[in-house]
Amino acid sequence: GFRCPNRSATGMSPLGFVVAALALALLAWALLRPRKPARALPADYHELEPPRTVLVSSVLFYVYLFIRACVLDAWDTLVARARGRGGAKAAAPRAYRVGAPLKSGMKDLYERRMFGFISDTFNRPITGEAGGEVSVCERAWSPQTKDWELTGRTIKCLNLGSYNYLGFGGCDGLCTPQVLDTVRAAGTSMASTRAEHGTSALHLELERTVAAFLGKEAAVTMGMGFATNSTMIPVLVDADGDGRGVLVLSDALNHSSIIEGVRASGAAVVPFVHNSMLDLEAKLRDARLRGRPGGAGPWRKIIVIVEGIYSMEGEFCNLREAVALKKAYGAYLYLDEAHSIGAVGRSGRGVCELLGVPTSEVDVMMGTFTKSFGSVGGYIAADADVVATLRARSQGTLCAAAMSPPAVRQVLA
């Protein structure tokens, strides 16, 4: 195989460090100076950026971490060279390995010199149930392992890092006994995909319940919320996997699972300004008037994708306006209710119920069971023929493991 010598610790030359440091400093300056939008923004645009002080202080902190990392690496290099020249031992021969290095450049530098410095703010383990309060496992930095080690003590904390909105994700007297009964009766896993022998009577009951709850003809469920978008959207764009001639108009702040699904579909994608119905209408009008680029004719299909509640911004979508626009311009509407289903509306039926929009006006409704229902997985609810196509063509049903029976029972409970 191809053999190459090991690169330096960071894979970057001193000049590269200087250039990167200058680039970070330039970025901080760019954030401080007043900015004008690159293009005219729609009248219904609203600013969602954090305060400038927060933005700049965050960037400057990372600049500090980067400079610190470079200094430490440079010091290690100088010490190693000094020992190699003056010590009794000769410098070790250069090691060789097969293939390219797994980590190099900024990725390697970040992991070795920067992430460890701030890693205690991430991935904190907890013990017990994730209810309104959580018991966080205390950690202390170990110079020997150069990592955070558990001390055996716990700290009682208010849980602000969960989307267990209704509290069903913990242990309670209603859901938990039913889940335990299901574990005893059906085990913990179907050990198969839905397309093979991973479908049980529980799964069919859940899908009928979801469809009836949302007023749709049918529904299909799968074991992961992220994969519901990333594996179902390509089939919705084109069942044969050919997204050419299909246009997706996606909110600029849609979730990464939507972005992955659209990217995998091969369709043309045009983002519209977050929650701006004026910008969405302008892009719909342009798509209908101009058609496909290069005079290739009209678009085969136009799909508008929005979220019920944008989780990072905490905003509701303008669903009434989106429905009116999709009807006026002959488009399809895909609604992601991962954070709204179960949590809003008089009976928990999501933004359609909250905003008074009939679910029949939304072509495809997506949601997850990981928030309000305290379980795992996701669903698509739509017309029966659409659901049948998804069930037969989506990688989420053909290749992924089915929802476990206890997780299904948790939703039904």
Image: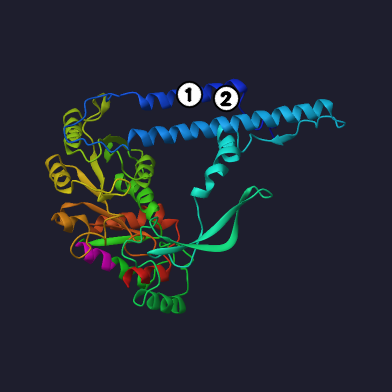
* Residue highlighted by disc 1: 23
Q: In terms of image quadrants, where is residue 102? A: top right
Q: Is residue 105 visible?
A: no
Q: Is residue 391 visible?
A: yes
Measured from the top left, where is residue 404 in percent x and y? Answer: 43, 67
Q: In terms of image quadrants, where is residue 293? A: top left
Measured from the top left, where is residue 96 in percent x and y? Answer: 74, 34
How many tags in the picture?
Answer: 2
- Residue 32 drawn above or below residue 247: above
Point 32% across, 36% down: residue: 51
**The one of 53 and 327 positioned closer to us in this rendering:** 53
**Earlier sequence position, callout 2 versus callout 1:** 2
- Residue 3 drawn above or below residue 341: above
Q: Is residue 251 magenta?
A: no
The residue range painted magenta reads: 208-215
Describe the element under mark 2 as helix, strand or loop. helix
Measured from the top left, where is residue 42 in percent x and y? Answer: 18, 31
Q: Amino acid at mark 1?
A: Ala
Decide if residue 361 is on the left or right side of residue 210.
left
Decide if residue 385 is on the left or right side of residue 392.
left
- Return the mark for residue 17: 2
Q: Residues within 10 Å of mark 2 (few under 14, many from 20)?
A: some
Q: Amino acid at mark 2?
A: Phe
Point 37% across, 37% down: residue: 54
